[in-house]
Amino acid sequence: MSGVPVVLGVESSCDETGFGIVSDGVLLGQGLASSASQHAEFGGVVPEIAARAHLEAAVPTLRIALHDAGVELRDITHVAATSGPGLATAVHVGLAAAKSVAWSLGVPLFGVHHLAGHAAADTLEHGPLPAQSIILIVSGGHTSILHVKDLVADPIEHLGDTLDDAAGEAFDKVSRLLGLGYPGGPAISKAAVGGDPEAFSFPRAMLRPGDQPYVFSFSGLKTAVARTVESLERAGEEVPVADIAASFEQAVVDVLVTKALRAVQEKGLDTLVIVGGVAANQRLRAVAQERCDAAGVELRIPPIRLCTDNGAMIAAVGDLLVRGGASPSGLQIAADPSAVLHGAQLPLPAGFAV
Ligand code: KG4
Ligand code: ZN
């Protein structure tokens, strides 16, 4: 291992405890634990439960990652951890674990932005990103179209974000109102199998001429689904869950792909990268592939296991930062639960910055 960085990544921003080990752009191994089943009865993530689950899972999951990678703890040369955004209580646990490892080994620590991790996940499967690309981030808390150059060296330009709900949040809310449970994305996808995506024509917000081209809004769609369910129930009719789920999915996917592809074309680029938990959605993957093929655009989406939160993606950012010569954050890095994505590495808290 001499000379080659071996980077440990730590993720704990929501309900997944993830440790990943990456060296020179290659994923050596990872460990992942989820507290999703503990939140199901509450219909969403309960921060205190998530934090406790991270605390319990941290050491065993780190051991699994080391074993999977075939390395010893002493082989780790750098540590990277999500320092934001995310649930404050949850981020603190992973960040404290990362600090403990970095301090005990005497190795540098990097505080990284969770969403940069989602983007970096794709490099583990498809290699370095092109010089410029459009990245559509679709997660439980964020939906953005980004113009990305060097992911770890250049500022990240937001072409547009969501005005209200994130795409994943829309899946979670609609799942709850259809009685399908948490997490909503996989539940809706499962329910939509065999459903007719044209059965209901739900609104495609922000797609009219004159609307902001890269901005999203999903709260109206959620309300439209709620109204549809209410009026069917009031009329005493059976709610066609598969058709509603498929039509809802189609409406979300239609808007996401239309806007992201428009960004690629209007910026004169040739690569679209789709990342984040919602990128695990089969309909999104299929529709994006079809429309990118028709437009002559290269589509990159990480494999499903790397779309939802994991430690490998954070290790991937750390590895890119190390190889790019970035300065470590140091042990004084603090959690920033509402950090906006301007760059892959999060700045030190005010007063510590050099
Ligand atoms: O990226 P992620 O794991 O966590 C955040 O950073 O938020 O994304 C979680 C989100 C949840 O809202 C979940 O419902 C959604 O991703 N999701 C999906 C699918 N799998 C997870 N949405 C649609 N289809 C899926 N198959
Ligand atoms: Zn995420």
Image (spheres, rainbow, N blue to C red):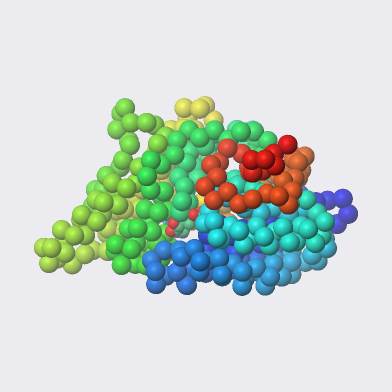
Give the x, y percent position of residue 155: 61, 33
Frontmost residue, 134 versus 293? 134
Above/below status of 81 relative to 300 = below
Determine the residue located farthest toward the front in the rendered image.
351
Frontmost residue, 286 versus 71? 71
Quadrant location of the C terminus?
top right
Q: Residue at x 23, y 63 (%)?
A: 240
- Figure quadrant of residue 325: top right
Give the x, y percent position of residue 331: 73, 52
Above/below status of 57 relative to 149 = below
Image position of 105 (left or right of 164): right
- Figure quadrant of residue 270: top right
Above/below status of 33 relative to 123 = below
Give the x, y percent position of residue 346: 63, 43
Q: Residue at x 56, y 61 (%)?
A: 90
Q: Residue at x 54, y 30 (%)?
A: 269
Q: Is residue 207 visible?
A: yes
All told, the count of numbered labels is: 0
Give the x, y percent position of residue 20: 68, 59
Q: Residue at x 33, y 63 (%)?
A: 176
Frontmost residue, 235 versus 85? 85
Image position of 228 (left or right of 337): left
Q: Is residue 301 visible?
A: no
Quadrant location of the N terminus?
bottom right
Determine the residue located farthest toward the right in the rendered image.
2
Image position of 155 (left or right of 107): left
Image position of 35 (left or right of 244): right
Frontmost residue, 54 versus 236? 54
Above/below status of 333 relative to 147 = below
